Each structure stands twice: as structure tokens, then as C-alpha cells.
Image: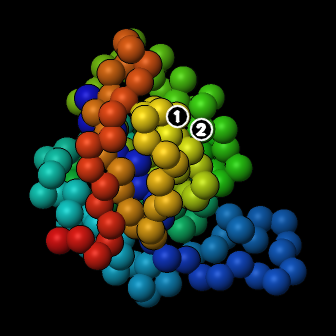
């Protein structure tokens, strides 16, 4: 099974004096939209459809996902508060892999944030040091739900072709 772990595109900077929900409401910059579009086009070249997309509720992640959904058919989309920047990657990975044992899928996309995405990759493939994701970067893993593990196969960086 293919698992695509994607970081959102470039977002506007955080506010100096945050108010409740300030981080969740940050949106993509023009550059972030362009990065997300380019990443979605790259993904389209490698995947004809996504069975399950799990997306952070934060604005910048949802905007990034919108670019993907315009390029590739997605069977099921879920918004999950478990994959925000403060989420627990180990808990999420365990629950996702257990779910995929019962509800198999050929391809899953997770659209989230740093540092969640880097720790999720490391948890699934412990042979890999937690990678730093560029904005709109995508890690591609082969995942074996029954073995509760995965292997990092490639990494799309927004400057790749």
C-alpha cells in the first residue's frame, strides 16, 4: 500500500501575539498555492487516484489538499484533529495501520504540518532519521499494515520535477 505524507504549502507567517485559533487560521501565500499546485501535478503523475485522504483541519492544510483534490480523484476525505502540528504521530500511525488491516486501501494521503509529518515518517520507517519537509513536500512510503511498518521509497521536494 502507498502512503503519501504531505506537508502544506508555504503559509503566511504566524502573528506576533497569537489569539486563540491564530495558527489554525493561517492561509497559504501565493507561493504556497503555486507549491501545492506543482506538488499536486507531481502526485497526479504517480497516482491515478487516492482511496483515503486524511487532512488537518488547519486552513493551510485544507487549501493544500484542495489543489490535490482538483488533480486526482479521492474516494474518501476525512478531516482529522489528530494530525495538527501538536498531534501524536505514533498514536495516529498505530490507529491508521490498524484501520487499514480492516479497511484495506491501495493509496492513502495525509496532509499535515511540521513537525508531525517528519515524526510520522520516522515512526513508520525507523531506519530513516526524521526528515525535514520542505513546504508542499511529499514522502512516499510503502506500508504493510499487518507488519505495522513502512519503508520510505522516495521524497518529492517542491523543486523536483
- Relative to residue 97, is residue 57 depicted above or below? below
> Is 32 displayed left or right of 12 in the figure?
left
State the separation of the CA atoms marked 2 and 1: 7 Å
Identify residue for label 1.
123
Q: Are marks 2 and 1 in contact (CB under 8 Å)?
A: yes
Residue labelled with disc 2: 89
Q: Position of residue 3 (x, y in %)?
A: 33, 39
Quarter that holds the C terminus: bottom left
Provide the secondary structure element on which disc 1 rests.
Answer: helix
Decide if residue 146 is in sight here. yes
Q: Quadrant of the N terminus?
A: top left
User: Residue 92: percent from the left, percent from the top?
Assistant: 57, 32
**x then y, percent, for residue 147:** 38, 14
Tell me which residue sits at (44%, 68%) in the image.
134
Q: Quadrant of residue 25?
A: bottom right
Image location of residue 74, percent across then percent down:
28, 45
Q: Residue at x 71, y 68 (%)?
A: 23
Does dot 2 land on a helix, a strand or a loop? helix
- Going by the image, does 44 lie left or right of 127? left
Residue at left 58%, top 58%?
A: 114
The residue at the point 42 percent across, 85 percent down is 31
Can residue 62 be seen? no
Q: Which of these two is toward me, 69 or 15?
A: 15
* Nearer to me, 40 or 133: 133
Residue neighbourhood size for the residue with mark 2, other residues' Cα within 10 Å, grouped as few (<14), some (14–19), many (≥20): many
Amino acid at each position: 500500500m502507498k502512503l503519501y505524507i504531505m506537508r502544506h504549502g508555504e503559509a503566511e507567517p504566524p502573528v506576533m501575539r497569537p489569539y486563540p485559533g491564530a495558527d489554525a487560521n493561517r492561509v497559504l501565500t501565493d507561493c504556497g498555492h503555486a507549491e501545492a499546485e506543482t506538488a499536486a501535478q507531481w502526485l497526479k503523475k504517480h497516482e491515478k487516484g487516492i482511496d483515503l485522504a486524511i487532512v488537518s483541519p488547519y486552513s493551510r492544510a485544507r487549501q493544500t489538499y484542495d489543489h490535490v483534490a482538483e488533480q486526482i480523484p479521492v474516494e474518501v476525505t476525512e478531516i482529522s484533529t489528530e494530525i495538527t502540528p501538536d498531534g501524536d504521530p505514533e498514536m495516529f500511525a498505530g490507529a491508521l495501520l490498524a484501520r487499514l488491516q480492516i479497511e484495506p486501501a491501495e493509496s492513502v494521503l495525509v496532509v499535515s504540518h511540521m513537525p508531525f509529518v517528519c515524526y510520522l515518517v520516522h515512526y513508520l520507517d525507523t531506519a530513516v532519521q526524521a526528515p525535514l519537509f520542505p513546504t508542499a513536500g511529499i514522502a512516499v512510503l510503502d506500508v504493510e499494515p499487518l507488519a505495522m511498518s513502512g519503508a520510505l521509497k522516495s521524497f518529492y521536494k517542491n523543486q523536483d520535477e
